[in-house]
Image (spheres, helix red, strand yellow):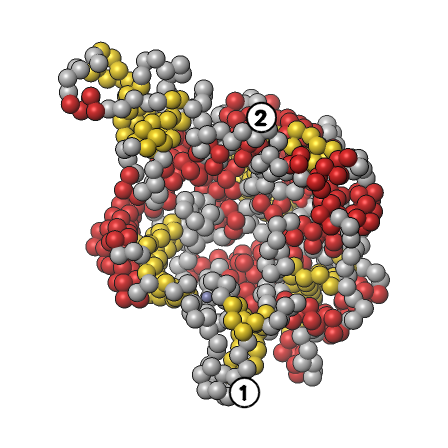
Amino acid sequence: MTGAVNIARVVVDVRTKALDRTFDYVVPTELATPVKPGHRVLVSFGNVRTLGYVMSVIATRMKGDAEEERKLKPILKVMDEEPMLTEELLRLVDWLCFRYVCTRLEAIESILPGVFRQEKETEASSVVVLHAEQSPEDLERAAFSKQKRAPKQAGLLRQLARDGVMSLPDNGVVPSDPAVKALVASGHASLKRLEHIPEIAASLSSENEEGERTLTPYQERVLREVSKALDNGREAFFVLHGVTGSGKTEVYLRAIAQCLSQGKSAIVLVPEISLTPQMVGRFTARFGRRVAVLHSRLGAREKKDEWIRLRRGDARIAVGARSAVFAPLVDLGLIIVDEEHETSYKQEETVRYDAREVAKWRAKSGWGVVLSGSATPSLTAMHEVAQGEARLLTLPTRVNNSPLPPVEIVDMREELRAGNHQLFSRALASGVEAALSEGMQSILFLNRRGYASFLLCRSCGEVVLCPHCDISLTLHRAGEDPHLRCHYCQHRSPVPQRCPNCGEDALRSFGVGTQQVEQEIERSWPQARVLRMDVDTTRKKGAHQQLLQAFADGEADILVGTQMVAKGLDFPKVTFVGVVAADTMLAIPDYRSAERTFNLLTQVAGRAGRAYLPGKTVVQTFRPEHYAVKSAARHDYSSFYREEILYRSRFEYPPYCELALFVAVHEEERLAQGAAARFEREVLRRAAAATITVLAAAPSGVKRAEDQFRYQVVLKYSSWEAVHDAVVGAYGLVYDRLRRLKGYAVLDVNAGRI
Ligand code: ADP
Ligand code: ZN
């Protein structure tokens, strides 16, 4: 082989840490598609055939004799006509590696949907959507009559009644599923192909398609600022602070329209939980087929189709959860981050990226605008405003000017003093009773599942612990036999009659969980119908939606649940919301617990009286003076922010610095501890002292989990660029050593952002 040859630098899809490098392959001249950076290719590696990703292509002149050159293998096949990874996404791969300390393969795996990482196309002929053909009322009636004979059909009907549409897995079983077949045969539903999803979603939306409604003066003002930035074509960051119902989504829609009219594209990020057909419907009603929805419930083939539509520019707007930030759009003009304060924007496994940071990176790299909206902006976002890195825009009132519901704080110490030793204060009880007597609904919220959080021996003080983890076992008592369960590793054991330590018959349960609240409701109001929603009742696929549907249909008077009930739910008949214990979150030893409490309480308090009926909220607490509780009750974001930011600055927590968390994990405590200590020393040795604070190696919050010991080191710094080399050097060293000893280590950069 002589003359000019192209060499492709390829990341091969073979997973070992040691292989974070590229391998050179010859580009054969006879390939039908010229190989470009970003192409997926098929290569042989060792003695296997594997997929690879072309990082770059280099033209060289070969002399035809060098040993090296003859050893180079050829690229066997180019998988797609156009490279799936755009030039910008390739640069993003490098940035992800730098920012989150991952391999290039891991970064690519985060960006590309899983289906692109298979060599074989999944031949899915059955990309379908089951679409309602009757009114929700008719479907409900049908569901009711089928409940006994055909429960599966009934379940599908209920879901259709609520959502109007559902996509079915594309594994070929769909048309042969007898329940689906029966529904289609009986005319309740029809099967449609994927291309119709946007039309269907749009048909479910009450949106005015032309978007003709006049904006409120506040919306006008906000939009003017965003428009100016879009016209400028320069990078710009906005934080949009507006309560629920203040018209944020309307602003998003207008901004997107303008972005499209400039020939640019947009991404809309929402928390997964709010990716409902109604929400998607608002976007598709305005923009039709220009919207691609990236949904975790999409089948492999559908995901691939949506990605390709975006890649080709057939779709110009990507709507989806966290990973939609990687949408392969070119000319990206606008990224919207809705509910910006949601912790789900941070990925909690490798690659531990934060979609909000990726959004910023993409805006910077392409001169785009980021618009982050929330009723309770994160401290990080507001700090960026204070630093002049982002601009604050506000929508101070609801569009329909309806007031936010009044919130009453109940001091549970007072309640005890008044002789009430019950779980429910008098105010909470009368709130539930008022709703019951008016035929309305209540939600009771408690951030703790199970019956009681631990068993304590009143004789010797022993708490019953998980044999595999250093945490107490939770008492469960609903439905099945009472038992103890570990909320970390799911270990189960029977409830001991006597204390395992001293043998006395003195075990008592402490710490109320949702099951106990449910039992207490049944005792206090035997006539009331109760539903409970927590991890234990929503384990089965679809159970979450079914419970919500049942409550929305008025099948229960009271919904008890954990934070699942707090987010994004909108039930017009709910007039009372009770927070059983606001303190459970405050008690968590994390500097973010006040912010989390404030966010959650604000969300919960917004649940009552959403539609036309006035609502009321009661918050029970032992710490009524706490500023997170007080300001949430007054719907007063700014006073919360002022208190909280002072505390962060005094103790030097984010946003005044960035936190990285290193955790060493090993079966033997000594080795986990040793690795963490080694990491601490290595960072100190390598980094300039002024750039970083290294907290001493210490056991993690849960020191032993699933029989593995965990020791951690917390790093505080203000510039990742300044400490990167030192931290990554130390990490690499300790990581390799731990791996050889059959343990592992984790490094979570920017672990402390909400
Ligand atoms: P948010 O996203 O802040 O919760 P939305 O954009 O959903 O607020 O607006 C709340 C409700 O008010 C929606 O039903 C929306 O259709 C309606 N709405 C928004 N802007 C206007 C407007 N300018 N005129 C009339 N109705 C509006
Ligand atoms: Zn356990």
Q: Position of residue 167 (x, y in %)?
A: 64, 37
Report helix, strand or loop for mark 1: loop
Q: Position of residue 500 (x, y in %)?
A: 47, 81
The answer to which quarter of the image holds residue 439 is bottom right
Mark 1 or 2: in front is 1
Answer left or right for 585 relative to 617.
left
Q: Residue at x 46, y 73 (%)?
A: 465
Q: Tag 1: residue type?
A: Asp
**Mark 1 Cα-neighbour bin, 10 Å: few <14, some 14–19, many ≥20:** some
Q: Is residue 80 above or below residue 270?
A: above
Q: Residue at x 26, y 56 (%)?
A: 741
Residue under label 1: 505
Q: Position of residue 370 (x, y in %)?
A: 52, 37
Q: Pick whichever, 318 or 378, lies toward us.
A: 318
Q: Residue at x 17, y 15 (%)?
A: 64
Which residue reaches farthest top?
3
Residue 265 visible in image: no
- The yes-or-no answer for disc 1 within 8 Å of ligand 2 is no
Report helix, strand or loop for mark 2: loop
Answer left or right for 76 relative to 605.
left
The answer to which quarter of the image holds residue 423 is bottom right
Indicate which quadrant contains ligand 1.
top right
Q: Tag 2: residue type?
A: Ala
Residue under label 2: 315
Q: Position of residue 670 (x, y in %)?
A: 27, 66
The N terminus, quarter of image: top left
Q: Pick whichever, 433 or 292, lies toward us.
A: 292
Residue 192 visible in image: yes
Answer left or right for 239 relative to 148.
left
